[in-house]
Image (spheres, rainbow, N blue to C red):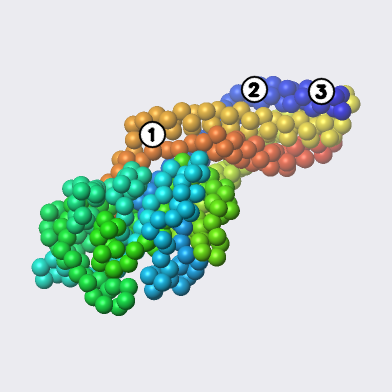
C-alpha cells in the first residue's frame, strides 16, 4: 500500500512538472479555472449574503427563532385566535428562559381591525408587543421616521411604511383603531403614531402595525398572548433548542414552531436562488471542461513521440492514462486554490467598500450589499475545479494510452 502511494505521488509530481513545462498553454487553462472559481465565489457569496440578511430580517423583525403557541393555532386558530390564547405568565415561560441558548422570550397578541385617519379607513394586521422585550428585534426592524414603542407611552404605536403611505399618515398623527373583541363586540381606541417602520418584506409593511401589548389586550378584551417569540443566540441552534424546550412543556398544551415553517416567502426565495447558483456552477463547469479538454488534447498531439518513447521503455498504458489524468488534476488543484484565495480576498475588499444597491421592488430604501465567502464555499469551488478538470482529462488521457507505440515513435519524423 505504501509503495502504491509513493508511486502515485511520484506520478503526480511528474504531472505537475509537465504542466509547468507547457507554460503558455497552462497559463491559458489556469486563467479559465481561476476566473471560473472567482466568479463562482463572488456570485455565490453575494447570494449567500442576501439570503442570510433576509433570513435574519425575517427572524428578528417578525417571527423569532421559535414560536410557542397552542396546538393547531396556525392551522385552525388564525380565524379565531382568541380560542388559542397562551397564559399571561406561567412556569413554562421561566423554564424556557432558563435555557442557556435563549436570549429572550417575548409575548405577542395578534389582532386585526380598521385604522382611521380623517376620512381614510384601511384594514390592518396588528401585533401587541412588549416594548421592552422587543429590543432584541431592533436590528432588523427599521424605524424610518420617529421612534420605537415605549412602555412610557401606552397609546403610541408604530405603523408600516406602506400602510402609512396609503393612509397619508405621518409621525405624530392621531388615529383611531377599531377592532372586534374576543366576544364579538366592537371596541375602539385613540392612538398616535410614534414611528414609521419598514422590514425586508413589503407585504408585511403594507398592512402591519405594532402597539403596546397592554393596549392590544384592552382593545380585544383578553389577557395572555397568541404566541411567545423565543430568540436564540445562534440561528443554527434552532432545531436543537426546540427539541430541548419540547421536553419542558406539555405537548397537549404547547406547540413549538420553528421560524422556517412560518417563513414561506423566504423559503421560496432560497429555492429560487439555489437553482440559479446551480445553473451558474453548471455553466462554469462546462467552460472549464472545454478549456481543459482543449489543453490536454493539444498536449497529446504535441507529445505523441514522447508518449511512444515512455511506452517503449516499459510504461504501461494505465501509467500513461494516469499521467494525463494527473495533469488535469494538477491544473484543477493549482487553479482552484489560486481562485479560492483571490476570490476570498476580493470578497473582503468589496465588502469593506460596499456594493450600492437600488431599492428592492416595491420598497423605497436602498441598501449596501456585501459578499460572504465561507470556508465551505471555497472548498466546494476547489472541488468543482478538480472534478471538472478530471472529467475533461478522461478522453485525452484515454486517447494517449491507446496510441500505437510504433506509430507514436514515428510521429513528426
Residue drawn at x 65%, y 36% is 386
Quarter of the image where the N terminus is located: top right
Sequence-wise, the earlier of marks 3 and 2 is 3
Decide which of 52, 356 is in the foreground and name it. Answer: 52
Q: Locate residue 63 relative to residue 395 in the image: left or right.
A: left
Front disc: 3 or 2: 3
Q: Locate residue 16 relative to residue 111 in the image: left or right.
A: right
Q: Secondary structure under badge 3?
A: helix
Q: Locate residue 328 relative to residue 140 in the image: left or right.
A: right
| Labelled disc at residue 20 | 2
Q: What percent of the width, then of the height, locates residue 408?
A: 81, 32
Q: What percent of the width, then of the height, locates residue 9?
A: 77, 24
Residue drawn at x 38%, y 33% is 350
Q: Residue furthest front?
A: 91
Front disc: 1 or 2: 1
Q: What percent of the width, then of the height, locates residue 55?
A: 43, 49
- Gap between marks 1 and 2 measured at Cα: 35 Å
Q: Quadrant of residue 213?
A: bottom left
Question: Dot 2 surroundings within 10 Å: few (below 14), some, or many (20 or more)?
Answer: some
User: Pointer 1 and pointer 3: residues touching (CB < 8 Å)?
Assistant: no
- Gap between marks 1 and 3 measured at Cα: 44 Å
Quarter of the image where the C terminus is located: top right
Question: Dot 1 surroundings within 10 Å: few (below 14), some, or many (20 or more)?
Answer: some
Q: Secondary structure under badge 1?
A: helix
Disc 1 target residue = 351
Q: How many marks?
A: 3
Disc 3 target residue = 6
Q: Residue furthest right?
A: 314
Residue 106 seen in the current view: yes
Decide which of 175, 153 is in the foreground and name it. Answer: 153
Q: Secondary structure under badge 2?
A: helix
Amino acid at each position: 500500500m505504501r509503495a502504491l502511494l509513493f508511486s502515485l505521488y511520484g506520478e503526480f509530481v511528474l504531472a505537475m512538472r509537465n504542466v509547468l513545462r507547457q507554460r503558455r498553454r497552462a497559463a491559458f487553462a489556469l486563467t479559465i479555472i481561476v476566473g471560473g472559481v472567482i466568479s463562482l465565489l463572488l456570485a455565490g457569496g453575494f447570494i449567500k449574503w442576501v439570503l442570510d440578511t433576509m433570513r435574519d430580517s425575517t427572524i428578528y423583525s417578525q417571527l423569532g427563532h421559535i414560536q410557542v403557541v397552542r396546538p393547531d393555532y396556525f392551522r385552525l386558530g388564525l380565524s379565531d385566535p382568541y380560542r388559542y390564547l397562551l397564559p399571561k405568565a406561567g412556569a413554562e415561560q421561566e423554564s424556557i428562559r432558563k435555557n442557556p441558548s435563549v436570549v429572550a422570550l417575548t409575548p405577542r397578541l395578534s389582532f386585526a381591525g380598521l385604522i382611521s385617519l380623517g376620512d381614510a379607513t384601511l384594514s390592518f394586521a396588528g401585533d401587541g408587543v412588549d416594548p421592552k422585550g422587543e429590543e432584541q428585534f431592533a436590528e432588523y426592524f427599521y424605524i424610518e421616521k420617529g421612534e420605537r414603542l415605549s412602555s412610557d407611552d401606552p397609546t403610541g404605536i408604530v405603523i408600516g411604511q406602506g400602510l402609512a403611505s396609503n393612509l397619508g399618515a405621518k409621525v405624530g398623527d392621531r388615529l383611531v383603531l377599531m377592532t372586534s373583541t374576543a366576544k364579538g363586540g366592537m371596541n375602539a381606541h385613540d392612538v398616535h403614531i410614534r414611528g414609521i417602520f419598514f422590514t425586508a418584506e413589503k407585504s408585511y409593511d403594507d398592512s402591519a402595525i405594532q402597539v403596546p401589548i397592554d393596549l392590544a389586550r384592552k382593545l380585544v378584551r383578553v389577557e395572555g398572548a397568541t404566541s411567545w417569540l423565543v430568540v436564540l443566540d445562534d440561528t443554527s441552534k434552532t432545531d436543537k433548542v426546540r427539541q430541548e424546550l419540547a421536553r419542558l412543556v406539555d405537548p397537549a398544551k404547547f406547540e413549538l414552531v420553528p421560524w422556517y415553517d412560518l417563513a414561506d416567502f423566504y423559503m421560496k426565495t432560497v429555492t429560487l436562488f439555489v437553482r440559479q447558483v446551480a445553473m451558474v456552477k453548471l455553466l462554469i463547469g462546462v467552460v472549464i471542461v472545454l478549456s481543459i479538454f482543449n489543453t490536454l488534447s493539444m498536449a497529446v498531439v504535441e507529445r505523441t513521440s514522447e508518449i511512444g518513447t515512455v511506452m517503449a521503455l516499459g510504461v504501461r498504458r494505465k501509467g500513461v492514462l494516469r499521467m494525463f489524468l494527473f495533469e488535469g488534476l494538477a491544473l484543477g488543484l493549482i487553479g482552484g486554490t489560486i481562485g479560492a484565495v483571490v476570490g476570498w480576498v476580493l470578497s473582503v475588499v468589496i465588502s469593506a467598500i460596499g456594493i450600492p444597491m437600488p431599492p428592492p421592488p416595491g420598497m423605497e430604501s436602498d441598501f449596501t450589499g456585501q459578499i460572504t465567502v465561507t470556508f465551505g464555499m471555497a472548498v466546494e469551488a476547489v472541488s468543482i475545479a478538480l472534478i471538472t478538470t478530471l472529467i475533461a482529462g478522461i478522453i485525452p488521457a484515454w486517447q494517449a494510452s491507446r496510441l500505437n507505440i510504433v506509430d507514436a515513435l514515428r510521429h513528426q519524423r
